[in-house]
Amino acid sequence: MRLSLARTRIAAFLGASLLLVLSGWVYLEVQGLGFPDGFLTELDHAKKLLASLFLCVSLPIALWLGWLGWVAPHQPIGDRLQRTAGAYGAFLLGLAGIYAYLRQTLLGGGGS
């Protein structure tokens, strides 16, 4: 049982670290969008909106996972960790689907 607690604690801290790194990378990618004169295409505007949604969800979840890792020695967190990972995975799949749809329609690949 002690090994299981250690694994869930490590998984929580790794998840929090991964989300923080991913959020930083997405933030830097969004800062580089557009042309040098500042023009943003429709797809760039959509990417900015999706990136801000990603950041608004990912950063609180990273803090939540860090907190779960912090309290793991005192209480079991396995169920909460699994529910959080499942909900976040569903969020990422939805976001990827929206991005694929926008990329297809805003690049002239869809429509009429």
Image (cartoon, rainbow, N blue to C red):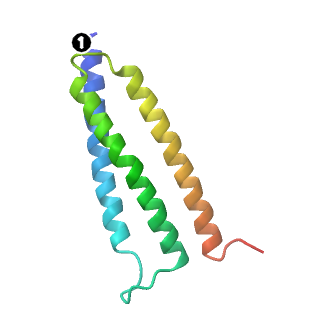
- Under mark 1, the amino acid is Arg
Q: Quadrant of the C terminus?
A: bottom right
Q: Residues within 10 Å of mark 1 (few under 14, many from 20)?
A: few
Q: Position of residue 31 (x, y in %)?
A: 33, 71
Q: In the displayed image of the protein, which residue is found farthest to the bottom?
A: 37
Residue at the spot 38% in from the left edge and 28% down from the top edge: 81
Residue at the spot 67% in from the left edge and 73% down from the top edge: 109
Q: In the displayed image of the protein, which residue is found farthest to the right?
A: 112
Q: Position of residue 20 (x, y in %)?
A: 28, 49
Residue at the spot 26% in from the left edge and 43% down from the top edge: 17
Residue at the spot 63% in from the left edge and 68% down from the top edge: 104
What secondary structure is found at the residue carrying circle 1?
Answer: helix
Left of 18 or right of it: where is 49?
right
Left of 7 or right of it: where is 91?
right
Viewer-nearest residue: 56 or 34: 56
Q: In the displayed image of the protein, which residue is found farthest to the top?
A: 1
Q: Is residue 67 above or below residue 104?
A: above
Viewer-nearest residue: 38 or 7: 38
